[in-house]
Amino acid sequence: SSEKWNFKAGGKASANVNLRINPSFQNNQVGIDGFFTLCGSFKVTRNLTRNQPESKKFLFVKYGKSTRKRALSFQYNLGLLNNTLRNGYAYTDDSSVRNEFGILKGYEFKVFSGLRMSSALNYTMALKNKNEIMISYVWDAYKTGGSYDKFEMANHMLKFTFFFATK
C-alpha cells in the first residue's frame, strides 16, 4: 500500500435465504433455500483526494477546483467454503397433505457444495459537513452442486449509501 493505493486481503462471511411461495405448485408451493459461505476477499482502493485547490485560466475565464476527498474501490470475493441447506429433489413436501407441520422436513445440509462469487465497485465522496456519500454497483452470483436439483441465482444492485459524521 501507498498514499494513493491501498490493498487488503481477508475474508467475508455471507448468509442468504431464498423463500419461494407459489400456491399453484400445490405440494411444492413453499420452498426455502439457505446459502452460507466463507469467502476469500481482496480489496483495492485508489485515493482520489485533492489536497490543494487548483486555479486555472482558459482564455479570459478564470476557474478553480477546490479541495476534495474521493475514493474509488473494488472488492472481489470468492467462495471457499460453500454450504447449502436445501430440500431434496423437486422440492416435494407432503406434510400439508398429512396435516403435519414439516416446513424443513427432508432438507439436507451440504458442505463444499457449489460456487459463489461477488464483487463491489464503490465511489465515495466526502461532503463539506463531515458526511459522505457512496455509490456502488454490487453483484453476487451463486450456484449449488448436484445434477437434478441445481439452483443458480445472480443479483445485481445499484446502491446509494449515506454516512453520517465521518472524520
Image (cartoon, rainbow, N blue to C red):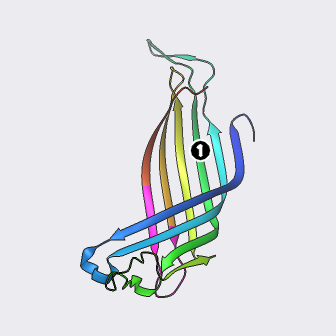
Left or right side of 95 for 145: right
Q: Nearer the viewer, residue 144 or 127?
A: 144
Give yes or no for residue 151 being in the magenta stretch.
yes
Image quarter in which the N terminus is found: top right
Relative to 131, say whether 42 is above or below: below
Relative to 124, say whether 118 is above or below: below
Left or right side of 21 for 58: right
Q: Residue 116 location in percent, x, y?
A: 56, 67
Mark 1 packing: few (<14 Cα in 10 Å), some, or many (20+)? some
What residue appears at the point 63 percent right and 76 percent down from the top-left corner? Answer: 111
Image quarter in which the C terminus is found: top right
Relative to 69, say whether 6 is above or below: below
Task: Answer with the quarter of the image where residue 112 lies.
Answer: bottom right
Q: Residue 88 location in percent, x, y?
A: 47, 84
Relative to 133, say whether 59 is above or below: above
| Magenta-colored span | 142-156
What residue appears at the point 48 percent right and 45 percent down from the top-left corner? Answer: 136
